[in-house]
């Protein structure tokens, strides 16, 4: 997670790689929830969805930031998996990361 200040707003950007291994024909994406300074929920965003063609190791770039300036100071980042590309479950979450 990279943080910057843009136009007076804290702006988080999730930059990294989505990895799927031993997930043949399953779909994966990243999920990020944004929160304000009082812990109030602001917005949820998802990365592009990717399908693993086989059980090998596959990786895709992720680059997510909020669509509009908001006073964001906390985020929750999760990896999501789906067997059908439409109904996702969260399999790995980092918990809340606080802006320092």
Image: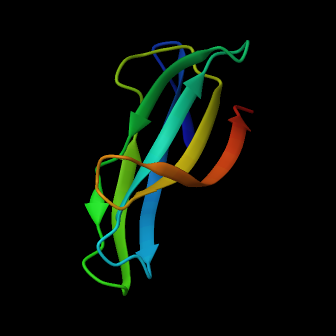
Of 84 and 31, the residue lying toward us: 84
Q: Tell me what residue is drawn at x 50 percent, y 50 percent.
A: 89
Up the image or down, 2 lies above or below 74; here it is below
Up the image or down, 31 lies above or below 79; here it is above
Of 4 and 16, the residue lying toward us: 16
Of 26 and 11, the residue lying toward us: 26
Q: Residue furthest bottom?
A: 56
Q: Tell me what residue is drawn at x 44 percent, y 79 percent.
A: 21
In the rendering, at what x and y percent does residue 2 appear? 55, 43
Colour setup of the view: rainbow
Residue 25 is drawn in which quadrant? bottom left
Up the image or down, 65 lies above or below 40; here it is below
In the rendering, at what x and y percent does residue 39 appear? 71, 18
Of 20 and 89, the residue lying toward us: 89
**Seen in the image, is 46 located left or right of residue 8?**
left
Residue 66 is drawn in which quadrant? top left
Up the image or down, 81 lies above or below 63; here it is below
**Seen in the image, is 51 located left or right of residue 35?**
left
Q: How many marks?
A: 0
Q: Tell me what residue is drawn at x 45 percent, y 51 percent.
A: 15
Q: Tell me what residue is drawn at x 67 percent, y 50 percent.
A: 94
Task: Pick the quarter of the image with the C terminus.
Answer: top right
């Amino acid at each position: 997670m990279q943080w910057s200040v843009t136009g007076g707003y804290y702006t988080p950007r999730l930059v990294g790689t989505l990895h799927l291994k031993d997930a043949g024909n399953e779909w994966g994406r990243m999920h990020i929830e944004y929160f304000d300074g009082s812990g109030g929920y602001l917005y949820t965003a998802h990365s592009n969805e990717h399908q693993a063609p086989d059980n090998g190791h596959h990786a895709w770039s992720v680059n997510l930031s909020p669509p509009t300036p908001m006073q964001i100071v906390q985020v929750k980042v999760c990896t999501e998996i789906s067997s059908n590309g439409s109904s996702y479950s969260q399999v790995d979450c980092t918990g809340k990361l606080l802006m320092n």
